[in-house]
Amino acid sequence: MVRFSARQLVGAALVAWLLVGTLALISGPPLGHDEAAYAVAARGDAPTWHYRSSGMVVIARLGLALGGSEAALRGVMLIVATGLILGAFALGRAAFEPRTGAWAALVLVGAHPMAARSAELIGDLAASGFLLGGVAVLIGELERATSRWWLLLAAPLFAAAFYVRYGSAPVIAMIAVLSILLYAKKLASRQMLATVVLSAVLLVPHVVHSIEATGSALGILNVSAHMPRREYVGEGLVTYLTSNPFRFYGALVTPVMLAGVASLVRRAPRWRPQIFIVLLALAQIISLGIQSHGQPRYVFFATALLVIAGVDAIRRGFAVRPVAHAPQVALGLVASAWLILAILIVPLHREVAARRAPLYAAAATVRDDAKGRPCAIAANVVPQLIWATRCVTIVARIAPKLSHPWPPAELHYIVSVPHALLGPQAVSDVAATVPGIARELSVGNPSSQVWRVE
């Protein structure tokens, strides 16, 4: 019977992740809202969006330097996002053993909410990977009799997670609290002191930028904290607990996550890492669920943590009660989940492209009509329009309330698209804010409308 090593298993996970990511890269739809926002911020023609993570803007600039195509932007992100697989392996190895980390990486490869976004220009996967790596270093060193100077690596990993996604700040605070609660006696060391100092130093550029931009060291974080929408307190928590888990988290991931939560009932040989990982996951889900609406990508880190804990719990269960051919069955399940994902990724992206077609058809109409002349667009969705047209934008719903809503421009357009529709009265109100008459242009998509005010 062939027994694969942990290195072979994690190698297979990386290959599988990159294969699906490449399919996503090839079949990818036009840039989404957040992707376009980072792209135009990197290009330098975005409005003042202080809440957009500076690390993602840097990553987008790398894509621009490689040609600036959507494939180039997403290709850089695909490489960075592989950190999720490596981070899961590293944390599973540090907290339990190498094979736990390798199997956790394989399970995550089949998580369709993650893999489908592996080549998207968003920071959730990258931040989760950096956080997993940071926790791996932290637990690995705190579980030793004496921490080594390798502990210093946790500082840049957590800093990278923060810069790529400002929403990582509360999670990093939770990690600090759990470290104090579970490893208080291990924290009084030169290595930990140096790690804390290095972490503070790495945050200086953000603090300086925040003070310059908002006048407060916490200004950008305060703005970021208020950006996620919610209809009521706890809306996200309701979503996380009541959504179909197989669709929301993944068919293979869901039972493993549940095993991770249930693992608290039975203490593992290395119980501190077990409690650390599960409590950290639950704390992120609860805090995010109270603060904002729910999306799978917001809890990628918590999902990965529970998968790691669940894999360990399942492996310990099989050690007590052996099941014939368990590794082969597990490999079959993982391979099946990945194969289904690989088959469905292209149709999925075509569906997304179809939903974005009206918006990009409107953008093409504006771009072709403007012919490179200075232009401004009033619409209720702006990042993708900026990316596709290079026009400046104003928010249509508030334009009539402003005394001077339009920036200097030679041409003025009004755009209405699905999910950001403008009724006749709204169009008239916006058109009245600039001298001229709104004339509707022909758009190649019946679901969108464009007017030029002249």
Image: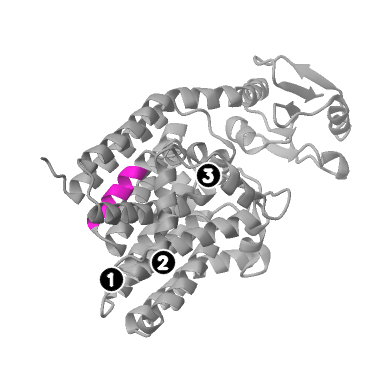
Q: Residue at x 22, y 49 (%)?
A: 322
> Quick one: SS at disc 1?
helix
Q: How many angstroms separate mark 3 from mark 1 (CA)?
A: 32 Å
Q: Amino acid at mark 1?
A: Trp
Front residue of 379/288: it is 288
Report the colour scheme: one colour
The percent position of residue 392, horizontal first and vertical second, equals: 68, 38
Residue at the disc numbered 1: 150
Residue 177 lies, in percent from the top left, at 49, 73
Give the image location of residue 339, x and y in percent: 33, 29
Image spot of residue 280 (x, y percent): 47, 63
Residues at marks 3 and 1 touching, judged by CB atoms closer than 8 Å: no
In the image, 2 versus 59, the foreground residue is 2
Rendering quarter of residue 36: top right
What residue lies at 38% left-to-right and 47% top-to-bottom?
A: 80
For the N terminus, give its image quadrant: top left
Q: Which residues are magenta?
A: 98-107
- Secondary structure at badge 3 equals helix
Q: Residues within 10 Å of mark 3 (few under 14, many from 20)?
A: some
Left/right of residue 258 with respect to residue 366 in the rendered view: left
Q: Residue tagged by mark 3?
A: 296
- Disc number lying in front (3 or 1): 3
Q: Identify the disc placed on residue 275.
A: 2
Q: Quadrant of the C terminus?
A: top right
SS at circle 2 = helix
